[in-house]
Image (cartoon, grey):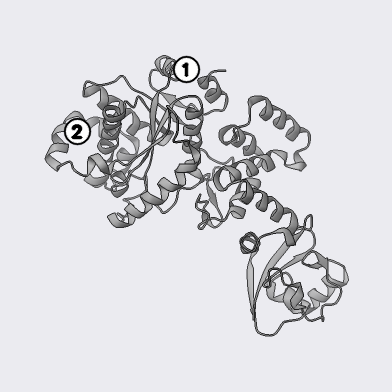
C-alpha cells in the first residue's frame, strides 16, 4: 500500500494541489516537506497532533521533515474569525519557540538521509528590511485575491489591521525560502490554512521556482459540534506541566463512541488490519470501550512515554477499586486526584465521616452515616464501617494523600498537611 493510499484510508487528505502530481511526488523518491507551528502559547495542544503525527507518517515513508516554529509569524498572528489577536512581546515568543521545538523533537528522527531539521522563519524574515519585503514579496500579491480570503472578508466590517492582513505574505515567503534553502517541495497543514498554503504555492511559482505541492488535513470536530482539543478545564496541552499525563489520558479515554474510531485512524500507527479488527471488536462489545483504551494508551505513550501511559492506566483502575493505589507515583496520584477535586486538610486528623463531608461526597453528617451504613463509602478502596473513627496517619498514601469513594464511580481526593 502506498503512502497516499494510507493517508486516504485514514481520512487525512482533504484538499490538494494538482492531485496527480502530488501522488506521484509522495509515492516517488524522498521529498522534503514542511509543516509550521506558530508559538501563540507556551505549549502545543492536542489540536496540533494531526500535523505532528502526519509529519511522522511522511518521514516513516522516506520523506524529510522541516519542522518550522514561527518566531516571526508568531509575532504577527494568523487572522482569527472573531477579532484581532493580542501581540505578545518578542522575548516571550522567543521562549515559547524554544519550548515548542523541544516538544516536537521526540516525534521525528534527526538521523539518516531524511533526518528532520528544525527551522525558524525569524532567521530569514528578521534581517529583511520593509523595503526589501515589499519589493521582493508584496509585489507578487494581488490585493483582490487577498481580500477574497474568507477570514479577511469576514473581518472587513469589524476591522482587520494591516499587520494581520499581511500574515499571508509572511507564510508564503516561508515556503519560497525553504524551497530555495532546503529544496522543500511540499507544505501541508490544517484545512483552515488552505488559503495561506496555496498563496505560498503560487508565490513560489511567481518567483520562477518549483513546481511545489501542498495538501491539507481535515479539521477535527467532535460529533456534538464542539471543538476538538478542549476539555472542561480548557485546552489539552502536550506539556506535562500544563496538562498532566493522567489528564491527557483521560481526555482520550473519554472520547465519544461516535468519534473514537475515526480518531484511531487519524492518530494511531496501528496497521489497517489491526484497526479493522479493533473496530469489529468495539462494535461487538461497545461497553468494554476497547477503542478508547487503545487510543488513550497509544497517544499518551507517544506524547509522554510508555511509563507515564502505564501509570495513567494504573491510576484509572486503582481509583475505581480495580488496582493497587500503592503502585502509583506521588505525581500521578496527585494529578489524578486533582482532576476529581482535591481538598486540603490541615491540623488535627479528622474523623472519616468528617472527611466525607469535607470532600463533598456527602452533604451532611446524616447522609454520611447512611452511606457508611449501606456499605457505599470507601477510603483507599477499603470499605468504611465506622464514621466516627479518627483517620490513622498510616493510611496516608505517600504520607499525604487519601482516596475517598462513594459507590462505584464517585471519588474525591484529600491532601493532608500537618
Taking 333 as reference, is 198 left or right? left
* Crowd tier of the residue under label 1, counting other residues whose Cα lies within 10 Å: few below 14, some 14–19, many 20 or above: some
Asked if residue 326 is positioned above or below residue 62 in the image, the reply reads below
Residue 348 image label: none
Q: Quadrant of residue 144?
A: top left
**Which residue is under mark 2?**
137
Report the quarter where the N terminus lies. top right
Query: Which is more toward the observer, 103 or 403?
Result: 103
Taking 294 as reference, is 16 left or right? left
Q: CA distance from mark 2 to mark 1?
A: 32 Å
Q: Position of residue 155 (x, y in %)?
A: 31, 44
Query: Which is more toward the observer, 365 or 137?
Result: 137
Task: Name which of mark 2 and mark 1 comes first in the sequence.
Answer: 1
Asked whether residue 136 is in view, the answer is yes
Q: Quadrant of residue 86?
A: bottom left
Single out the residue that lies furthest toward the bottom.
Answer: 348
Q: Which residue sits at x=80%, y=78%?
A: 366
Q: Do the numbered discs 2 and 1 sit on residues whose CB atoms are within 8 Å? A: no
Query: Which is more toward the observer, 313 or 263?
Result: 313
Q: Which residue sits at x=84%, y=73%?
A: 370
Asked if residue 41 is positioned above or below residue 196 in the image, the reply reads below
Q: Which residue sits at x=66%, y=60%?
A: 329
Q: Secondary structure at mark 1?
A: helix
Taking 194 as reference, is 203 left or right? left
Asked if residue 120 is positioned above or below residue 358 in the image, the reply reads above
**Which residue is under mark 1?**
27
Front disc: 2 or 1? 1
Amino acid at each position: 500500500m502506498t503512502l497516499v493510499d494510507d493517508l486516504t484510508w485514514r481520512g487525512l487528505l482533504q484538499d490538494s494541489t494538482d492531485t496527480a502530481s502530488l501522488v506521484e511526488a509522495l509515492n516517488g523518491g524522498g521529498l522534503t516537506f514542511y509543516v509550521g507551528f506558530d508559538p501563540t502559547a507556551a505549549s502545543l495542544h492536542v489540536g496540533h497532533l494531526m500535523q505532528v503525527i502526519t509529519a511522522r507518517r511522511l518521514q516513516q515513508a522516506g520523506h524529510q521533515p522541516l519542522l518550522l516554529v514561527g518566531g516571526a509569524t508568531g509575532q504577527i498572528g494568523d487572522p482569527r474569525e472573531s477579532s484581532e489577536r493580542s501581540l505578545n512581546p518578542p522575548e516571550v515568543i522567543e521562549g515559547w519557540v524554544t519550548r515548542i521545538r523541544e516538544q516536537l523533537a521526540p516525534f521525528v528522527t534527526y538521523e539518516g538521509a531524511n533526518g528532520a531539521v528544525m527551522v525558524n522563519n525569524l532567521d530569514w524574515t528578521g534581517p529583511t528590511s520593509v523595503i526589501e519585503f515589499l519589493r521582493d514579496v508584496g509585489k507578487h500579491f494581488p490585493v483582490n485575491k487577498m481580500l477574497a480570503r474568507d477570514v479577511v472578508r469576514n473581518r472587513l466590517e469589524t476591522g482587520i489591521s494591516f499587520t494581520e492582513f499581511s500574515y499571508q505574505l509572511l507564510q508564503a515567503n516561508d515556503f519560497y525560502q525553504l524551497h530555495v534553502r532546503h529544496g522543500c517541495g511540499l507544505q501541508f497543514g490544517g484545512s483552515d490554512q488552505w488559503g495561506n498554503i496555496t498563496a505560498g504555492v503560487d508565490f513560489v511559482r511567481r518567483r520562477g521556482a518549483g513546481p511545489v505541492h501542498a495538501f491539507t488535513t481535515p479539521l477535527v470536530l467532535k460529533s456534538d459540534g464542539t471543538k476538538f482539543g478542549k476539555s472542561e478545564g480548557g485546552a489539552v496541552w502536550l506539556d506535562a506541566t500544563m496538562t498532566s499525563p493522567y489528564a491527557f489520558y483521560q481526555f482520550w479515554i473519554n472520547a465519544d463512541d461516535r468519534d473514537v474510531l475515526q480518531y484511531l485512524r487519524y492518530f494511531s500507527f496501528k496497521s489497517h488490519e489491526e484497526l479493522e479488527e479493533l473496530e469489529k471488536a468495539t462494535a461487538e462489545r461497545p461497553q468494554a470501550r476497547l477503542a478508547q483504551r487503545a487510543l488513550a494508551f497509544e497517544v499518551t505513550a507517544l506524547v509522554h512515554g510508555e511509563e507515564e501511559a502505564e501509570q495513567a492506566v494504573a491510576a484509572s483502575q486503582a481509583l475505581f477499586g480495580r488496582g493497587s493505589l500503592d503502585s502509583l507515583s506521588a505525581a500521578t496520584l496527585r494529578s489524578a486526584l486533582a482532576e476529581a477535586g482535591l481538598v486540603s486538610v490541615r491540623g488535627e486528623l479528622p474523623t472519616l465521616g468528617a472527611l466525607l463531608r469535607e470532600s463533598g461526597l456527602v452533604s451532611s453528617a446524616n447522609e454520611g452515616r447512611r452511606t457508611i451504613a449501606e456499605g457505599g463509602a470507601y477510603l483507599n478502596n477499603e470499605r468504611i464501617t465506622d464514621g466516627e473513627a479518627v483517620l490513622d496517619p498510616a493510611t496516608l498514601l505517600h504520607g499525604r494523600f487519601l482516596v475517598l469513594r462513594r459507590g462505584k464511580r464517585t471519588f474525591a481526593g484529600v491532601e493532608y498537611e500537618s
